[in-house]
Amino acid sequence: MKTTCNSARLTSGSAEVMDPEDRPLMVMPLTEIHRQLLPHRSVAVLVYSQEGKLYLQKRSRGKRHFPGRWDISASGHVEPGQAARDTALAELSRRLNIKAEQLRFVRLLPASPGTGFEFTSIFALERVHWQPEPNPDEVEEGFFYSAEEIRYLIREFRELLTPRLVHLWETGLPFPTWGAV
């Protein structure tokens, strides 16, 4: 049975709990979904410079999860009834003040402990020619990093990175074999 709620006030901070095939079952508060380790949907957006470097953001110290750690360009939970692409575009705008029109879908990661039990839709924004302007409520700072620089960070400074960034690296992202950026 799928439970939905059309009121933004009631769905804010909520997400759809998914079955093992990524089909919605019900809507619950995110805090409860995370506490129970229930599968739900999220997005991750990888922003690349013209040189093929990946933008990493340092999460705000006010964040509940992994404050002050380096993370992928942008991410967020898919709200009930919202499309993953719409969530990705909204997160880019909210976190990095990027008003994008085109995102490339890269792949869907299955819900697992490595993804925080999130079915994660990965999108890429490629060949940006400007420096993103982070929202200080969401992001402390950010920089573009080469694959070599990220490899070094993973090897030497793993504790400064979010588990999501490390997991994506270990699964072949953010510099995958799906083509030159």
Image (spheres, rainbow, N blue to C red):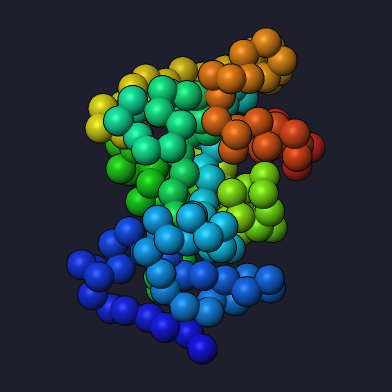
Residue 93 in percent (x, y) is at 32, 43
Seen at 47% across and 61% down, the residue is: 33
Q: How many numbered marks are there? A: 0
| Image quadrant where residue 57 sits | top left
Q: Is residue 148 above or below residue 106?
A: above
Q: Is residue 91 above or below residue 1?
A: above
Horizontally, residue 74 falls left or right of residue 124, namely: left
Seen at 31% across and 79% down, the residue is: 5
Horizontally, residue 163 falls left or right of residue 173, namely: left
Q: Is residue 172 above or below residue 37?
A: above
Q: Can residue 146 be seen in this view?
A: no
| Image quadrant where residue 48 sits | top right
Q: Which residue lies furthest to the bottom in this view?
A: 1
Seen at 34% across and 27% down, the residue is: 60
Q: In this view, does 33 lie above or below 53?
A: below
Q: Residue furthest front?
A: 36
Residue 130 in percent (x, y) is at 40, 24
Residue 116 in percent (x, y) is at 59, 49
Q: Is residue 53 visible?
A: yes
Seen at 58% across and 20% down, the residue is: 159
Residue 148 in percent (x, y) is at 70, 14
Question: Which residue is nearer to you in this view: 145 or 24?
Answer: 24
